[in-house]
Image (cartoon, helix red, strand yellow):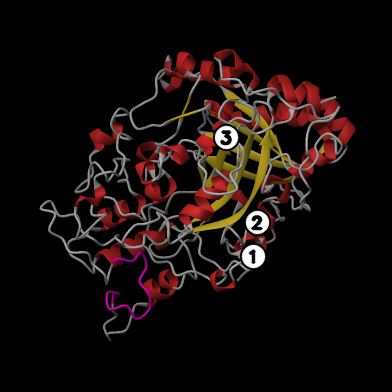
Amino acid sequence: MAESTQPTPNLSTSTDSQQPLAGGSANQPLLPPHPALAVADLKNIQGDVIVGLPKKAQKFFFFTIADVDTFRKRLVSVIPLITTCLQTYENRQAIRKRPRKEDRLHMSGVNIAFSWRGLQKIDKDLFQGGASKDPQLFEKGMRATRQSLRDNPDNWDPKNWELFDPALDKKQGFDVAPDGAGQIDGVFNIAGEEGPRVESEWAKVAATLGDSINQAFVLNGAVRKGPEAGHEHFGYMDGISQPFILGTEDLLGPSLPGQGEVEPGVILLGRKGDKIESQGPSPAADLPEQERFAWQKDGTFMAFRYLRQKVPEFDNFLARAASVDPRVSKDLLGARMVGRWKSGAPLDIAPFQDDRSLAANKDENNNFQFEDNDSITSNPHSRCPFAAHIRKTRPRKDLDPKFMDFERVLRRGIPYGPGLDPKGSESKVSKADRGLLFVSYQSHLSRGFELMQKTWANNPDFIFRKDPNPGLDPIIGQSHADPTETDVTKQGAKLRQSTGLFSANAKDGTNEKDETTGVAGFKLGDKGAPKDADGTDKDELGEEQGEAKHEWVESRGGEYFFVPSLSSLLQYIAL
């Protein structure tokens, strides 16, 4: 493996966990009972959180603070450049009124977030331990918890990033000049309609902050073009299912069928619905509100993941694996792994073939609950497999609403890297770096991102009490060894096994449960595994997918950040 010359992004801020404070102090006043959200409050919330910055291109500029006092003083002049939720809404409305490209307004947005290490640099007395409450994931940082997420630690090492190509960013109009490695104190999130516009907006911020910060690493993303706009690199429409935040009705209109309404405190700290961490099976709905410090109000925790997608390998697997069973096409197998067709049409409503009109109908494309799947006793997940990605990460009625209504996140990811080479040079193996820059916002990391990745996607027993056992999420499930697991019998790597994916959808409902090919990625020796001409298992399917030596989605780094409100930036962070 060639050694990369790229600087280490080290998207982590590992620190020793500190004990949470018992109460407020002169520096840390506690908030009163949490209020509901009103439209006027959106002026105090950063724009990517509730509304989402409009973007065709996006830059994540990870930085370290070189001179704390200078940075805090200069930040005062940067804050007017920070885009609020209300501004973001107004920008989106203006864009809708000018649909023609030639009439489009040149808009961009800037947001900022800080790691725990960054907040500690700014004011160690103010930003004390216990900010994120038990289990203090924010304070520990994602690097410290990456093995409990079942990530491969080697994939976090830039020496293994043999495909990383900063020259690609330059072709897309981004300015890329990584100047060194280091820890991460914060990140600027800049979005706009094209790379040059993003760079122009970033130049204003960079000129203001000057030498008070150092660049640690830059990652750039761009929405795919043409008919692939809105689709991630595997080809599936992304970002369809997002929760509706109560309190935004007057601005954003009523929620859509199946969208799911959540209290603002599920996303924002210090708002109604921001509940304490459960120490047992009690649903969040039955728990009291979480005590928060004044500097946390209207902020949110941001989980960032640098996810590489192995597209040729995924496509090749679908083609070859689907050939085992003539009842299952490549497109159907992919839809059963994701839970949606590439158009975005949900398998739970359109189980037999894609339905583009359904996908485009916002009143219908989320209006399902997985409640009809268990009606065929011989094949209990004949419509949407228990292991399907969208079912694993949003179980809907598979979970009690008292849990589900508080276990939601807002997702704001964007693709990075080129599409597949149209000349076919990547028919089997990736030759370019591409994937998703994943972002989620939540008030509790342990009830948001970590729950979805660790307890749901990576857990072969989830969804609980299902027969057959679901297995891993075949798309984002991570399966590497976890030496931090308290039960030593569960520390080893997990098989990449997911049931129900090859159970063909039959309109008459007479299918028998298929025990031999109901796996995503055959185990070596399976009688259902494809064979070479000599009768041996095809190594490509067996070794790579069955033994989990390679996933189709690899986590290459990540970090947890706090996204402060505008008032918190002015009152507690800037000088």
Q: CA distance from mark 3 to mark 2?
A: 33 Å
Q: Which residue is mark 3?
A: 195
Label 3 or label 2, whichever comes before in sequence order? 2
Q: Which residue is mark 1?
A: 484
Q: Nearer the viewer, residue 414 or 469?
A: 469
Q: Amino acid at mark 2?
A: Thr
Q: Quadrant of the N terminus?
A: bottom right
Q: Amino acid at mark 3?
A: Gly
Name the mark nearer the viewer: 3 or 2.
2
Mark 3 and mark 1 residues within 8 Å of each other at the beta carbon = no
Callout 1: helix, strand or loop?
Answer: loop
Mark 1 and mark 2 residues within 8 Å of each other at the beta carbon = yes
Percent x, y for residue 288?
60, 33
- Please tell me whether the stretch drawn in magenta is mainly helix, strand or loop: loop
Residue drawn at the location 44% of the way across and 70% of the way down: 495
Q: Which mark is residue 236?
A: none
| One can see residue 418 in this view | yes
Q: Nearer the viewer, residue 174 or 211?
A: 211
| Horizontal relation, residue 528 to residue 408: left or right | left
Percent x, y for residue 379?
22, 59
Q: Quadrant of the C terminus?
A: top right
Callout 3: helix, strand or loop?
Answer: helix
**Mark 2, residues whose alpha carbon is within 10 Å: few (<14), some, or many (≥20)?**
some
| Horizontal relation, residue 74 to residue 417: left or right | right
What residue span does the magenta drawing correspond to? 518-530
Q: Which mark is residue 145?
A: 2
Q: CA distance from mark 3 to mark 1?
A: 41 Å
